[in-house]
Image (spheres, rainbow, N blue to C red):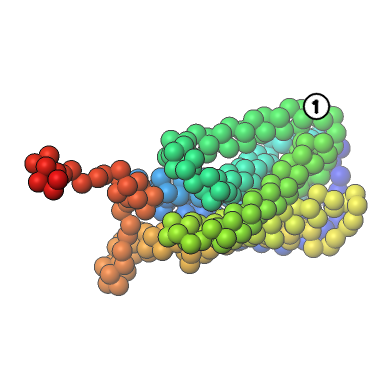
Amino acid sequence: MQCNSTSVINPLLANILNISKLYISFGSFAAATNILCVLVVLSTKQMRQKYGAFGLLSFGDLLNATGMVIAGVARTQLIYDNSYGSLSTFACFGRPWPIFFIVGGQLPAFVLVLMAGERVIAVFKPITYRAYVTPKTRTIANMICVVISILSLLVGIFFSYLNREDCTSATCTTINSTGRLYGTFNYYVIMFLPFVALLLSIIAYIGAKRLGASTNMKRELKKVLVSLVLAALAVILSALPNIILWGQGIFWNVAIVPYLYIGFSCNSAVDLFAFFFMKEDFRNRLLSIISYGYINRYFNLHEETETRARRNMVHSTIKPIVPSSAVEALR
């Protein structure tokens, strides 16, 4: 469908330009922080096994931040080329950033629930956790999150095609490019799942506090706290802004709405600092990468080469072998 080009008043274009510049700057910063997170997780086998879910979370956030940068650059260029007008919903989806926004918004939400659910199992079903939650099952669970996000994207493309006769704004938000029905579903996923992850993390935290007599449970409490912080940040910086974004123009008109998506992007940047201060081995590995090992050598920082869970499992399974002659002598 051909949509008639509609003129956009200059003050509105100036506001879009200002917001696009913020998208480019904040999106670039968020992308850089998530690239660092991904590099740290991929740097060693132990880091991949221990922080695979966080690496996938950072990858999803990287897609979202990249979408912000692309949207800022493309919208700026369209305005300078005097091509910023209405277009069909399906043509809107042809712009690259809706794809990044959908996968980059939903994938981290799925991973947050996965991370919180793992902590609940570790606290309340420790035997089941040690028996079944292995690096292989974690990899399978991470892949399931990726597959669900891709399937959701395909559904979004289908709904965009169904609404191809509709004309929409050149901003090409998720709702503009897919239609109100799928756009609402997308926002529900991004809004609802972080709250679920926060609730699960709170339950796990309370359980770990009550059962915190053993050394393993005290260690688990630290892991739960990390999951709790990540989920809380997602609720504050991602879920709440998306609630306002979803209802904009229908239930309310908030002037600062375009700036709220910046908070959505900044959520991913904050995750790096949360992990940096709360996970010592992650911090030491990051410092080693950005300084080529100089900081670690100078300050004698230790990089963990084997996960504690694996070490405990090995120590618990290896038993001292006593010669039969020694046993007979003790009798």
Q: What is the x, y in percent for residue 55? A: 49, 48
Residue in the image at 49% along x and 40% along y:
128
- Could you say which quadrant of the image residue 158 lies in? top right
Position of residue 48 relative to residue 25, above or below, is: above
Residue in the image at 20% along x and 46% along y:
320
Residue in the image at 85% along x and 52% along y:
248
Q: What is the x, y in percent for residue 285? A: 37, 59
User: What secondary structure is marked by label 1?
Assistant: helix
Q: Amino acid at mark 1?
A: Leu
| Residue 309 visible from this viewpoint | yes
Q: Residue furthest bottom?
A: 299
Residue hosting label 1: 162
Q: Residue furthest right?
A: 251
Q: Quadrant of the N terminus?
A: top right
Residue in the image at 9% along x and 46% along y:
329
Q: What is the x, y in percent for residue 85? A: 80, 44
Position of residue 146 relative to residue 277, above or below, is: above
The one nearer the camera, 97 or 57, is 57
Q: What is the x, y in percent for residue 271? A: 55, 59
| Residue 226 visible from this viewpoint | no
The one nearer the camera, 77 or 106, is 106
Q: Quadrant of the C terminus?
A: top left
Position of residue 147 relative to residue 314, above or below, is: above
How crowded pointer 1 is (Cα within 10 Å; few <14, some 14-19, many 20+) is rated as some
Q: Is residue 42 left or right of residue 163?
A: left
Q: Is residue 327 left or right of residue 297?
A: left
The one nearer the camera, 169 or 158, is 158
Q: Residue furthest front?
A: 331
Q: How many marks?
A: 1
